[in-house]
Amino acid sequence: MPPYLATPYFHLSKLPLTTKVALSCFYASLLTALAFVAFAVFAERTHWRVTEAQANFAGDERVTRETGARLERMHAEPSRRALYDIVHPHSFMMPLIFFVLVHLMEMSAGPRGAKIALYVSAFAAMTVMTFAPLLVSASLGFAWLVVLFAGVMLSAFAAMIVVPAWQMWLGKA
């Protein structure tokens, strides 16, 4: 029986200490990566602003030409190949992380509807973020989705890390 089907019978707090430590290290490294991407990489490139997200994926000259917005920093317009080089590794890696987090979350106690809502929102955000460079390059109007879903993905992935970790160490069976 897969572990996530055993949830009513096997609580995360009953995991062996070695498994708890290993999962905690995984959670810590993933939370660190999420924080770095959100607050260093994404924040540095976009400042969590729509016009900066547009410029990051389409270049400042195009943003000024199409929207009239003037940017303080110059952004070169990336080539189609550069955009593909961003999307390509993310299109494989992000679903794997999503898959692992969903399985760990499934081993946690919680309302089924809340889990489904969490999974759907995380999936939608992950998909938008994976293809964000192509979406914004195709139409600057999609940039607001990138800023919104970056926050949604960060929150959803963090919840799928914190809830199982909490239940694993502090939960009672």
Image (cartoon, helix red, strand yellow):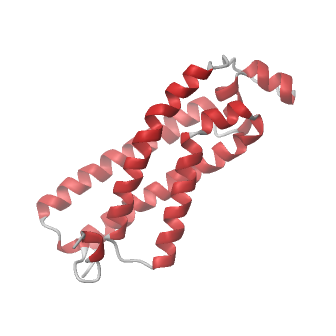
Q: Quadrant of residue 47?
A: top right
- Give the vertical position of 169 relative to 137 (above or below): below
Quick one: 143 or 81, which is closer to the camera? Answer: 81
Quick one: 95 or 54, which is closer to the camera? Answer: 95
- At which x and y percent is residue 172? 26, 80
- Name which residue lies at 18% across and 56% down: 21
Q: Is residue 110 left or right of residue 153?
A: left
- At which x and y percent is residue 114? 50, 74
- Name which residue lies at 12% across and 59% down: 18
Counting the numbered discs, the total is: 0
- At which x and y percent is residue 149? 61, 50
The quadrant the C terminus occupies is: bottom left
- Name which residue lies at 25% across and 55% down: 24
Report whether residue 150 is seen: no
- Give the vertical position of 79 relative to 119 (above or below): above
Q: Is residue 134 left or right of residue 140?
A: left
Report whether residue 26 is seen: yes
- Give the vertical position of 129 relative to 5 (above or below): above
- At which x and y percent is residue 127? 55, 48
Q: Quadrant of residue 62?
A: top right
* Residue found at the very far right of the displayed protein: 68
